[in-house]
Amino acid sequence: MNKEEYKLYIDNVIRRVEFARVRFDQKHIVKIVAISKYSTTDEIKALYQIGQRAFGENKVQDLKTKSSILEELPLEWHFVGNLQKNKINNLLDINPYLFQALDSLELAYELQKKLQSRSMTLDVLLQINSAKEASKHGVMPEDAVDVYKQILQECPNIHLKGVMSIGAHTNDKAVIKKSFETTYGIYKQLEGATICSMGMSGDFEMAIECGSNMVRLGSIMFNK
């Protein structure tokens, strides 16, 4: 696929985002984060050249490698993976634009300690396990508002910007939709929250129609 064909392909993805956005609300704005975990730095560059700026990785080492190779480009890096406590310092060395997957109060306290010792702050989203699936990380929906408030009060170096969740892992669209509605309902209760990150390549239109204002698109952005 040459550059022009690729641009047309990405324009079509953006059009789908636009249609979903307008179905939710004409004034709604949606940001696309291209998840590059299965993509090379050349593929990231190709997407950058047609206008994409925000990219996400789910492994700290991959984020470090790719952001270092591409440091000349003004990219906005998001970390979207599960963060192990022993990798916190490695992540803070990179200082990503946004850490999207803070999945427990315990991790928040550990992150706060490390941030405070470095006199740093970090923009973060609280991950919600909205479908209550054992295979997923995140706080339970019924605890989310309290946990969010607790982090705001007790972890001043963590700048909470909103929430993130992954749609229910099922083919039942009604169940997926309910998981998005659950997250959006929590998001609306959070004072000062500005980001509701929901939706991936297979379900982003439904997520946007449920209120998502940030989608994490991997395979579809890289035509894989």
Image (tube, rainbow, N blue to C red):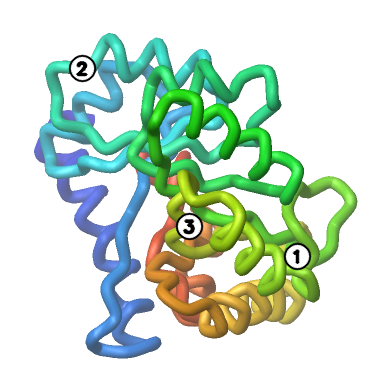
Tell me the kind of residue under disc 2.
Answer: Glu
Q: Earlier in the sequence, mark 3 or mark 2?
A: 2
Q: How many marks?
A: 3
- Distance between the alpha carbons at the discs numbered 3 and 2: 26 Å
**Image position, residue 14 (x, y; %):** 26, 60
Tell me where residue 202 sits by quadrant. Answer: bottom right
User: Which mark lies nearer to you, 3 or 2?
Assistant: 3
Do callouts 3 and 2 mark residues in contact (Cβ within 8 Å)?
no
Q: Is residue 84 left or right of residue 218?
A: right
In the displayed structure, 72 sits above or below 34; it is above
Which mark is drawn over residue 171? 1
Which mark is drawn over residue 160? 3
Tell me the kind of residue under disc 1.
Answer: Asn
Q: Which one is in front, 45 or 63?
A: 63
- Quarter of the image that includes the N terminus: top left
Q: Is residue 212 left or right of residue 10?
A: right
Where disc 1 sits, the SS reads loop
- Say which residue appears at 69% left-offset and 26% top-offset: 85
- Quarter of the image that includes the C terminus: top left
Residue tagged by mark 2? 71
- Distance between the alpha carbons at the discs numbered 2 and 1: 39 Å
Q: Residues within 10 Å of mark 3 (few under 14, many from 20)?
A: many
In the displayed structure, 5 sits above or below 87; it is below
- Say which residue appears at 62% left-offset and 78% top-offset: 186
